[in-house]
Image: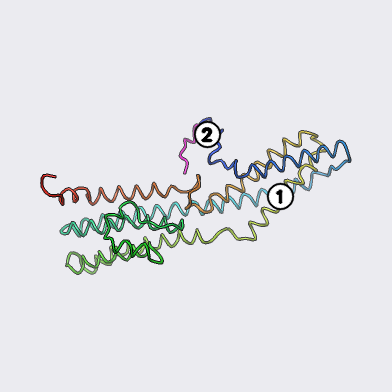
Amino acid sequence: MIQYDPHKWLDHFFDVRGSLVREIGGRVAVCVAWSAGVVAFHKHVHDVGMPSLLHTLMGVAMGMLLVFRTSSSYERFWEGRKLWGGIVNETRNLVRSACVHLKDDPELIARLTRWTVAFPWAAMHGLRGTDGLGPQIRELPVHEAQEALDAQHPALAVAVNITHCLREARDKGLISDIVFTSLDQNVQQLVDYAGACERIRKTPMPFAYAVHLRRSLVIYCFTLPFAMVESFGWTTVAGVLLLAYTFFGIEEIGVEIEGPFGHDDNDLPLEDICETIHKNLYALADIEKLHRDALPEGL
């Protein structure tokens, strides 16, 4: 995700990165070239002008279609952000409670914390179709980490390991069944959040809507010169440029943000969120202190 100051117009007004100019440039250029050809044909060969009322009415419908497209896409984007905010909160709550209830077993706290940190990394890689448990994978038990990576659903396998840690704490008498159930609720909530993210990723905009909108855009933009040429002459080219850039840009924004879990410039900063969770939980569980205490004296 591109970070910017919304109050400073000139700092990003002419930016190309993240503005989707590259994505829509070809479509807009074809529209402009077509409009120039229509104007030239109108002036030198035959009158091809048509009444503009039809395009005025169609423009209203196009506006409504595009508003629905972008609002639906932004709803998906914002829901994805809320779900990852929930992952942040649940991981914090889980480790916070564990640090209190398991204080007599620092090693178990550390293991649970490492698996909890691995969950958002596994969820992120699952949403992107890649593999990984985060940079702390070298601190996890090798065999268990490899089993999680090889699992059909790595994030779910990580959640199972978190619950194993909680069960071990219960078996040792560190927590009661009631506390175990309470802590495991955080794990269940993490799985629910990951599943909701998968729902967003696997459910694109309905095909019929996307196809109809794009066909309407092409028809509108490529017939627009016929409605403008009589009144605007060669200025039609500039008018088509502005309208095509606006309409194709709005549609492309919807495409860009409807799947917010990828690597695009406007997608959610999942790596930053995972790093934040990593730092927060390691600081909360004081993992670094545990590492120092485990070192031989004098090192």
Residue 94 location (% of width, % of height): 29, 58
- The secondary structure that dominates the magenta segment is loop
| Residue 8 falls inside the magenta stretch | yes
Question: In terms of secondary structure, where does tag 1 sit?
Answer: helix
Which quadrant is home to the C terminus?
top left
| Residue 44 falls inside the magenta stretch | no
Residue at coordinates 56% horizontally, 54% vertically from top-left?
72
Residue at coordinates 54% horizontally, 35% vertically from top-left?
15
Q: What residue type is labelled 2?
A: His
Q: Name the residue under label 2.
A: 12
Residue at coordinates 76% horizontally, 40% vertically from top-left?
35
Query: Disc 1 and disc 2: Cα gap in Å?
Result: 29 Å
| 23 or 87: nearer the viewer | 23
Residue 236 location (% of width, % of height): 76, 37
Q: Which amino acid does label 1 sit on?
A: Val
First in sequence, mark 1 or 2: give its number.
2
| 5 or 260: nearer the viewer | 260
Q: Mark 1 points at which residue?
A: 218
| 215 or 37: nearer the viewer | 37
